[in-house]
Amino acid sequence: MRVLVVEDDALLGDAIQAGLKQAGYAVDWMKDGVSADHALSTESYAAVVLDLGLPRLSGLEVLRRLRSRSATLPVLILTAMDTVNDRIKGLDAGADDYLLKPFDMGELAARLRALIRRASGKVDLLLQVAGVKLDPAAHRVLYRDSPVELSPKEFAVLHALMLNAGKVLSRARLEEQLYAWGEEVESNAVEVHIHHLRRKLSPELIATIRGVGYLIAADKAG
Ligand code: CA
């Protein structure tokens, strides 16, 4: 199994590469963000170990670019910055797990294994309706197997409709999904998000039931 390690610190990168090789991985090691971005757009990996503080292009930006192309590749971020904010930024940008430096090589290998295992078993957790696949754990959406970029609120609306496929959800019920993000909801927020979802996914996906709410029809059995 081939993994990419992105780390600009020579000693640490060398140790990670050696440790993961010993754990049985084929390891590519990149020392800056631009090389990492290039490797990730041209090569195929089972997982990525990504330092956040990198020369030329930040780890966060490498991660954002990766997520715009691939929704599912497991990413473990490394950060020396022991602040909640950096970890939140990394996780929000699509990281699957993180380790704070300094860390134990055994723990890194174990977490990587867990990520790869989870990624391969992800299919069971997917919600699938009408060509749309939604992964609640990874916060990702595919339409006809291509990744679709949704805002957190669009995702929340789509998630609610897919969880309740075949049932009509009122606007008030959908607004509750938005309030969970801790933001004030404008009066037409749901309509706007539904509009964006129709544009980004399919115009026919979400039906408006006049005076009642919105509906994603359940896939017919068989
Ligand atoms: Ca660094």
Image: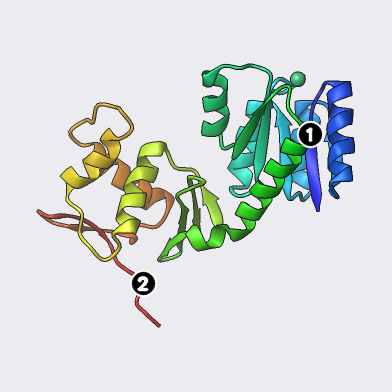
Q: Measured from the top left, where is residue 209 in percent x and y? A: 16, 59
| Quarter of image, res 185 | top left
Label 2 sits on a secondary structure element that is loop
Ligand 1 quarter of the rendering: top right
State the residue position of label 2. 219
Q: Residue at x 86, y 50 (%)?
A: 24
Q: Residue at x 12, y 55 (%)?
A: 212
- In this rendering, is residue 95 above or below 33? below
- In this rendering, is residue 161 above or below 42? below
Q: Measured from the top left, where is residue 208 in percent x and y? A: 21, 56
Note whether ligand 1 is within 8 Å of mark 2: no
Between 139 and 108, the residue placed more toward the observer is 108
State the residue position of label 1. 105
Which amino acid does the dot numbered 2 rest on? Asp
Q: Residue at x 9, y 53 (%)?
A: 211
Q: Which mark is residue 92?
A: none
Q: Residue at x 42, y 54 (%)?
A: 201
Mark closer to the chain start, 2 or 1: 1
10 Å crowding of disc 1: few (<14), some (14-19), many (20+): some
Q: Measured from the top left, where is residue 195 in percent x and y? A: 31, 46
Q: In the rendered image, is residue 73 in sight?
A: no
Which amino acid does the dot numbered 1 rest on? Met
- In this rendering, is residue 183 above or below 122? above
Quarter of the picture containing the C terminus is bottom left
